[in-house]
Amino acid sequence: MIKMTPPRQKSGEAIYIKHAPVLVGNCEFVNVQLDDDSVAEFHCSLRLLDDKLCVRDLGSGHNTELNGYSIRESVVVSGDRLTLGQLHFDVDYKHAKGVPPKDVILVKATD
């Protein structure tokens, strides 16, 4: 599990996610735990579908946006802005040298 402090407390902290799919939320049972009240316990999932990164809102009721638009499910590309509750992330989907493309996703937190 990866736990991250909200960006407003530690601006610019990055989350490196290896091996999608992952669950993102604000509880101990998710892969990426965001300690912020605006994030639902089970907020969204990130998965790979045909080598494309997809985000799916898990019925959070707490706002999942991609580039300012509320979404239920969408393909995400590098440079997109993902908002979970009140937390904003710039997504950078990279291929690490010597690692299959499916294995490395970088989600960089911003203010």
Image (cartoon, rainbow, N blue to C red):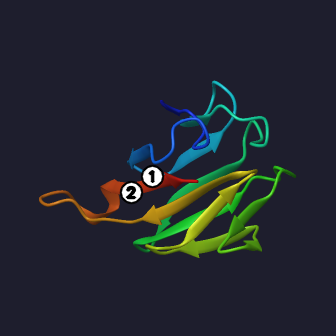
Residue at mark 2? 105
Quadrant of the drawing holding the C terminus = bottom right
Of badges 1 and 2, the one in the foreground is 2
The foreground one among 75 and 38 is 38
Residue under the image location 51 percent in, 44 percent down: 11
Residue under the image location 62 percent in, 52 percent down: 45
Residue at mark 1? 20
Q: Position of residue 102 (x, y in %)?
A: 33, 61
Classed neighbour count for the residue bearing mark 1: other residues with Cα under 10 Å, few (<14), some (14–19), many (≥20): some
Farthest-out residue, top = 28
Q: Is residue 16 left or right of residue 76?
A: left
Classed neighbour count for the residue bearing mark 2: other residues with Cα under 10 Å, few (<14), some (14–19), many (≥20): many
Q: Amino acid at mark 1?
A: Ala
In this rendering, is residue 16 above or below 70? above
In this rendering, is residue 33 above or below 39? above
Q: Secondary structure at mark 2?
A: strand
Q: Amino acid at mark 2?
A: Ile
Q: Position of residue 6 (x, y in %)?
A: 60, 38
